[in-house]
Image (cartoon, helix red, strand yellow):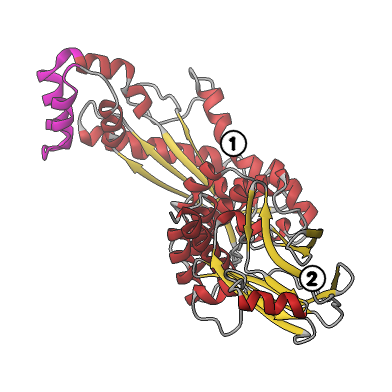
Amino acid sequence: MKGCTNHLCALFLLLAPAAGAQPTAGDVRISDLAVSRGEGKLFVSMTIDLSAVRLSSNRETTLTPLLAEGGDTLRLEPVTVAGRNRYYYRLRNGLTPVGGRLLRAGDASQVAYRVVVPYEAWMGSATVDLARETNGCCAEPIARAEERLTLLDLDPKPYEPRFVYAQPAAERVKVREMKGSAYVDFPVNRTEIREDYRRNPEELQRILRTIAVVRDDPDTRITSVSIKGYASPEGPWANNERLAKGRTEALRSYVGGRYDFPEGLIATSYEPEDWAGLERYVAGSDLKHRDEILAIIRGGLAPDARDRKIRTTYPEEYAFLLREVYPALRHSDYAVTYEVRTYTDAEEIRRLLRTAPQKLSLQEMYLAAQGLTPGSEEFDELFAIAVRMFPDDETANLNAANAAMQAGDLKRADRYLDKAGATPEARYARAVRAALAEDYETAARLFEEAQRDGVGEAGEALERIRERQAHERQTLKP
């Protein structure tokens, strides 16, 4: 295809395999057989060697190439070779073959046979045969024979996608974070922690377990612990600010007293009243006056005035919120930030994919995929895990889309392609998806763009798609 600039070039290269020199009925030889299609036409050419044909003066032989496939047959232009008497008899009486050629035995040894006929879809897998009929002086048949010359394979090659996976950039430092919320109970208006008070044993252990999981892992190093405390909106803002700040500091002292962390590793902040949490709850609720309460929360009133207006205007809903919702707004959010070492062993990475995928980078997962069979269940699962861990990463979504298409799950691939970005590789992947759906117009356009932007695999794919488009046009032709 080097040097071809349009789809016609591709069509004219759809040639049947050369038949070589083939003996036919002993004295007729066929060579240089070539069959091609393009522009809605079928081209047949061959050299017919008649040098060994010997006929008596009153006999003739008619050679008729024909195409046959199933119940479809097309007889091509015949070539009639006649002995001396038969040859002149035909000339005197105007009996030259209709649409064919008449030759006198001995005059032509090499016949350059060329014929063009309208192409029909069934011809793509037809046989090319040569029928021979020998007649006597009164046109009575003496012998008939038919021989196969070749089997055509002119249908476009099936589109077999080549998937282009993108290598993710390596993370210079792998920083990860574990988050959680704890609901530590404090006596009314107090800020000191009582470990045995109400739910505190369980809630405090939740924080300590999170830290311990990271601290005890030899592959990780804690870089910071953050704690942010919240109070609920009821009561004066100033008192809630005191409580949020004091309770956060108490929790920091509690955690710091159980681990030998360097100074400054634990960072704290606080929110005097968790209005954002209240807004989220109300927005998703079916409270009778939900919209009105939301309007108050989102309005420009100061916090104390806001709380008072909800309490006095909608006392029933306020009582419900105070009882069922506000306790959950008194919480401490915490996060453990840590660094993870780099992994280079593919087997170790594949083990971590099953046990601790959050410790891996996309680049490490890509490395582990190199030793797997593309299209296998394990290969597909690896990229599905990668996109689950990095759901908004364009490279992760692109590779997951490729793996899903390779596994035959086009519906899942569509979800990933929506977030695969606009790189040349992403356009190529969308072209593959369109081709698999037999949307050849879209596929051709996207392959052209990807080829123009440097995706090497796009050129070959574009040829296959253009062949399919031409075949469809010919098949649908009336």
Instruction: Tell me the chief SS of the magenta region.
Output: helix
Residue 260 can be seen in this image: no
Q: Secondary structure at mark 1?
A: helix
Q: Residue at x 31, y 23 (%)?
A: 326
Amino acid type at image mark 2: Arg
Quarter of the image where one finds residue 162: bottom right
Residue 145 in the image: x percent, y percent?
81, 59
Q: Residue at 50% of width from left, 55% of height from top?
A: 475
Residue at the bottom extreme of this rendering: 107
Crowdedness near tag 2: few (<14), some (14–19) or many (≥20) residues, C-alpha within 10 Å: many
> Which of the image's four quarters has the C terminus?
bottom left
> Closer to us: mark 1 or mark 2?
2
Q: Is residue 84 above or below residue 198?
A: below
Looking at the rendering, the stretch of residues picked out in magenta corresponds to 288-316
Q: Earlier in the sequence, mark 1 or mark 2?
A: 2
Left or right: where 391 falls relative to 379: left
Q: Which amino acid type corresponds to the residue marked 1 in the rendered image? A: Leu
